[in-house]
């Protein structure tokens, strides 16, 4: 099973990214989910270390590149997640050669 790396009884906040692949492109709908104990309505979001907003739930849709963290009372600040939204170099046309890269 999964074993948290925290003292017994301590709560932790997890920050999940959907879709899980990186880098994302501008038209991807990138959603961050803040999981942890505490009141969902009290989730505070930070971008690049600065206050970014407070959401009524635990989900946040990202529209700008940056390093994001979330904070939930009772479980604390999450780890940081770097989100990079890229613009493709150019449009692809039928017949173009495309090189695919697998990142793991």
Image (cartoon, rainbow, N blue to C red):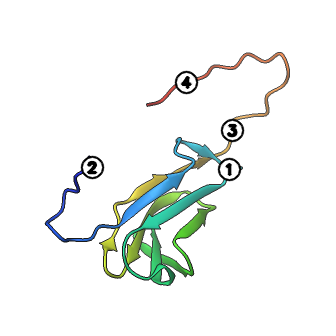
Image coords of residue 15 (percent x, y): 42, 61
- CA neighbours of label 4 inside 10 A, class few (<14), some (14 to 19), many (20+): few
Dot 2: what SS?
loop
**Mark sitting on residue 26:** 1
Of mark 4 and mark 1, the one earlier in the sequence is 1
**Circle 2 sits on which residue?**
2
Of mark 2 and mark 1, the one earlier in the sequence is 2
Dot 3: what SS?
loop
- CA neighbours of label 2 inside 10 A, class few (<14), some (14 to 19), many (20+): few
Tell us which disc is closer to us: 3 or 4: 4
Distance from label 4 to label 1 (Cα)?
18 Å
- CA neighbours of label 3 inside 10 A, class few (<14), some (14 to 19), many (20+): few
Q: Nearer the viewer, residue 64 or 14?
A: 14
Distance from label 2 to label 1 (Cα)?
34 Å
**Circle 3 sits on which residue?**
88
Tell us which disc is closer to us: 2 or 4: 2
Position of 57 with respect to 88 (left or right) is left
């Amino acid at each position: 099973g999964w074993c948290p790396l925290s003292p017994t009884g301590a709560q932790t906040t997890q920050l999940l990214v959907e879709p899980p692949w990186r880098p994302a492109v501008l038209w991807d709908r990138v959603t961050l989910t803040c999981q942890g104990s505490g009141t969902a309505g009290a989730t505070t979001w930070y971008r690049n270390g600065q206050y970014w907003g407070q959401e009524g739930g635990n989900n946040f849709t990202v529209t700008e590149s940056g390093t994001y963290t979330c904070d939930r009372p009772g479980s604390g600040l999450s780890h940081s997640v770097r989100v990079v939204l890229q613009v493709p170099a150019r449009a692809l046309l039928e017949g173009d050669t495309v090189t695919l890269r697998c990142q793991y």
